Amino acid sequence: MSRILAIDYGRKRTGIAVTDPMQIIANGLTTVPTHELMDFLLKYVAQEKVERIVVGHPKQMNNEDSENMKYIKPFVVQLKKKLPDMPVELVDERFTSVLAHQAMLDGGLKKKARQDKALVDEISATIILQSYLESRRM
């Protein structure tokens, strides 16, 4: 089988998570500077079998797109051009940063580690991917 890759897109850096090949467990992969994201993804997809890519869809409480969507739409368009055979789905990412911080607290991480924004982005991508996996099971 192949992996599912999730992206928590940010203007400066982007968190990335992937499933295992059986698509059971979501794991944080890395955080990359956003200007290097496309190169990273193309290289990763060339090395690993990836079935689809899910991208965090930033929404407001009233279910409308948030301000960050103006940065994500062009990225998704470019991603679909570079990988035309790869399905790309948007997944609601509301509260992922809050959940990431809570997971860090629950995991006993020290304050300095919790302030690592790259780690927060990677955990957020993992939460996006886990929620996607759970929605598919229902």
Image: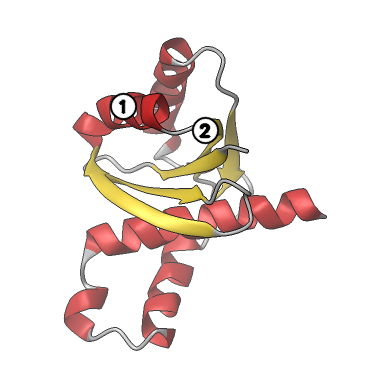
Front position in the image: 13 or 98: 13
User: At label 1, which amino acid type do we have?
Assistant: Lys
Element carrying mark 2: strand
Tell me whether circle 2 and circle 1 mark residues in contact (CB < 8 Å): no
Residue 65 at what x, y percent from top left?
54, 39
Identify residue for label 2: 50
At 41% from the left edge and 28% from the top edge, which residue is drawn? Answer: 45
Examine the rendered structure and indicate whether residue 82 appears above or below residue 73: above
User: At label 2, which amino acid type do we have?
Assistant: Val
At 66% from the left edge and 52% from the top edge, which residue is drawn? Answer: 133
Along the horizontal axis of the image, is 67 left or right of 84? left
At 35% from the left edge and 56% from the top edge, which residue is drawn? Answer: 122
Residue 124 lies in what quarter of the image?
Answer: bottom left
Q: How crowded is mark 1: few (under 14 residues within 10 Å), some or many (20 or more)?
A: few
Residue 87 at what x, y percent from top left?
60, 25
Q: Answer yes or no: is residue 65 visible.
A: no
Element carrying mark 1: helix
Looking at the image, tell me whether mark 2 or mark 1 is earlier in sequence order: 1
Gap between marks 2 and 1 measured at Cα: 11 Å
Identify residue for label 1: 43
Along the horizontal axis of the image, is 79 left or right of 32? right
Mark drawn on residue 28:
none
Residue 50 at what x, y percent from top left?
52, 33
At 57% from the left edge and 59% from the top edge, which residue is drawn? Answer: 25
Q: Answer yes or no: is residue 52 visible.
A: yes
Q: Residues within 10 Å of mark 2 (few under 14, many from 20)?
A: some
Front position in the image: 64 or 31: 31
Q: In which quarter of the image is the C terminus?
A: bottom right
Q: Quadrant of the N terminus?
A: top right
Query: Quick one: which residue is furthest to the left in this view?
Result: 112
Along the horizontal axis of the image, is 82 left or right of 88? left
Front position in the image: 3 or 82: 3
